[in-house]
Amino acid sequence: MSSGKFDVIIDTVAVHHEINKILPSLKVGGSYVLIGAIAKPMKISPMLLIRGNYSIEGSLIGGIPETQEMLEFCSKHNIQPKIKVIHAKDTNAQFKALADGTADVERAVIDMSTLAEL
């Protein structure tokens, strides 16, 4: 991930993951918003928070009006997700690339029609 590039990171991952590696992607004073429900406590480096003046927030996403407002905001500012559609057979390779930091995108979506080809 790029260092010091983002004002806000919206984390939708609903499984335990290491966020101390993600936080430095925020600009100084940036916000990390966690909306993926994770049951296990997460470890966060206090020094990382202090040095970057980062804030960590949580949200239950909201209802239909909030979702509509977010979609309109994204449309107005041409904010689009960076995703890659992958074949189901490439799932393990994508997880490995994410784990070792060589993935070309952070969000891969499995083409479910390719499951029948496994």
Image (cartoon, rainbow, N blue to C red):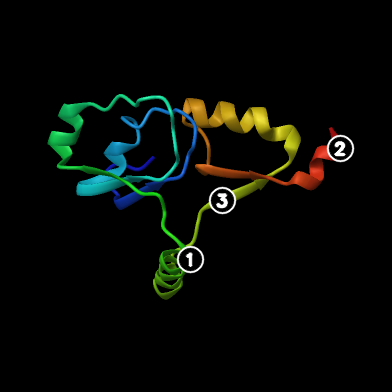
Three-letter code, disc 3:
Ile
Q: Nearer the viewer, mark 1 or mark 2?
A: 1
- Which residue is rendered at x = 13% and y = 35% of the image? 50
**Quarter-wise, where is residue 72 in the image?**
bottom left
Q: CA distance from mark 1 to mark 2?
A: 37 Å
The secondary element bearing badge 2 is classed as: helix
Give the label on residue 64, or none: 1
Q: Secondary structure at mark 1?
A: helix
Type of residue at label 2?
Answer: Glu
Instruction: State whether residue 67 is above or below residue 3.
Output: below
User: Is 102 in front, or is 111?
Assistant: 111
Q: Which residue shows up at 35% across the image and 43% down it?
A: 2
For the N terminus, the quadrant is top left
The residue at 44%/33% (across/down) is 38
Q: Residues within 10 Å of mark 3 (few under 14, many from 20)?
A: few
Residue assigned mark 3: 83
- The quarter of the image holding the C terminus is top right
The answer to whether 107 is drawn above or below residue 21 in the figure is below
Q: List the residue tagged with mark 2.
A: 117
User: Residue 106: x and y, percent?
Assistant: 50, 42
Residue 112, x across and y down, in percent: 75, 45
